[in-house]
Amino acid sequence: MAAATMDRAWTASALEARVVRYADLKPCLNAFIDTRTPGSSAKENFTIIGPGVSENPDQHVHIAEAHGFNIGGARQPPGCTNSQHSHDTAEVFVVHTGRWRFDFGEHGDDAQIHAGPGDVVSFPTKAFRGFRNVGGETGFLWSVLGGDDPGRVTWAPQVFAMAKDYGLVLLENGALVDTAAGQTVPAGVAPMPVTDRSTIAGLRMMRPEDEDEVLARAPVAALPGETLVIGDGGELPAAEGFTLTRLTLDGDDRSAEISRAVAEVVFVQTGAVAVITPAATLMLGAGDTMTVPAGTPRAYSSEGDATLFVVRGV
């Protein structure tokens, strides 16, 4: 990916096409097997960069270009739950809005942590987790998944039983079939086996005392500059394939101009940010995502206080 982007002369319109604005996000309302489970039916899933882990082939992908990691999002109203599941690659959430509870274990009762705007939650691989909007407003989680192909979701056994009651069948090839809508299981394709006890026994059991490994709180008063959140020497352990940095700008502040040979994706947590390149200056607002071409000089500035999160390939 890096070589392809570095050899290209970027225009202002081409750079704008690499911006996914929060207002333009296209959700999938039935991305996963638990989409009709009471308490989970109102969640929205987004694939911003890369294919993500959606089980619905109709999920809209905003930017398909391979980066070595995936960017996505989840938006849920108060009380809405994402069921217990596990991933084979890293999963990181930046809490953009809302108050959230993250539940660990097959039934969500091994450990729980709470997080709010600006907090970062990084899940270990192969560990059951779920999450619930426990606040009073609709909340949005911006996510990073490791790898170009982050694999499939491993669901807790009870999720399969609840899905069957509402006409949804997950196939062993990872596709979701909606029998309530008249779809049928294709010939020669078996349903996904219910997660067995030996698989569950091989997953990590999280404990309340593991919170420091999982959660990085937003600073009360961050100083201008970069803070490594995920990576060697960061606030949280390194994740395979990417780093995550918090960049804080104050009024009239501008970061140093840099050019990198790896993918760099920026997400605006708060404030308004100018992305300054030789071809154009693009303005980003809170909730917007941009992938900056590898090899393109860039700097970030803001007329007021702003916080960005920056994901870089390694």
Image (spheres, rainbow, N blue to C red):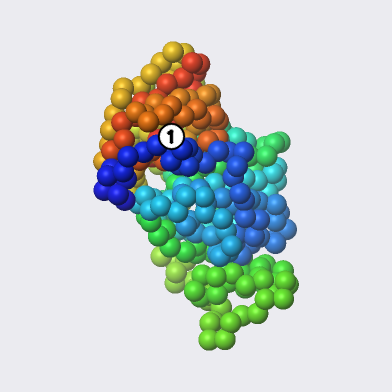
Label 1: how many Cα within 10 Å (few below 14, some 14–19, many 20+): few
Image coordinates of residue 259 in percent, x first then y, are 28, 33
Looking at the rendered structure, the secondary structure element under dot 1 is helix
Q: Is residue 209 visible?
A: no
Q: With 20 as the anchor, is 204 left or right in this view?
A: left
- The residue nearer to you, when weighing 91 against 26, is 26
- Residue topped by disc 1: 12
Q: Quadrant of the C terminus?
A: top left
Image coordinates of residue 158 in percent, x first then y, are 61, 66
Q: Is residue 296 visible?
A: yes
- The residue nearer to you, when weighing 246 against 56, is 56
All told, the count of numbered labels is: 1
Does 157 appear above or below 14?
below
Does 88 appear above or below 71?
below
Residue in view at x 48 percent, y 25 percent: 273
Q: With 247 as the anchor, is 190 left or right in this view?
A: right
Image coordinates of residue 136 in percent, x first then y, are 71, 36
In which image quadrant can residue 205 be found?
bottom left
In which image quadrant can residue 226 be found?
top left
Residue in view at x 52 percent, y 24 percent: 272
Residue in view at x 38 percent, y 53 percent: 66
- The amino acid marked with disc number 1 is Ala
Image coordinates of residue 105 in percent, x first then y, are 52, 56
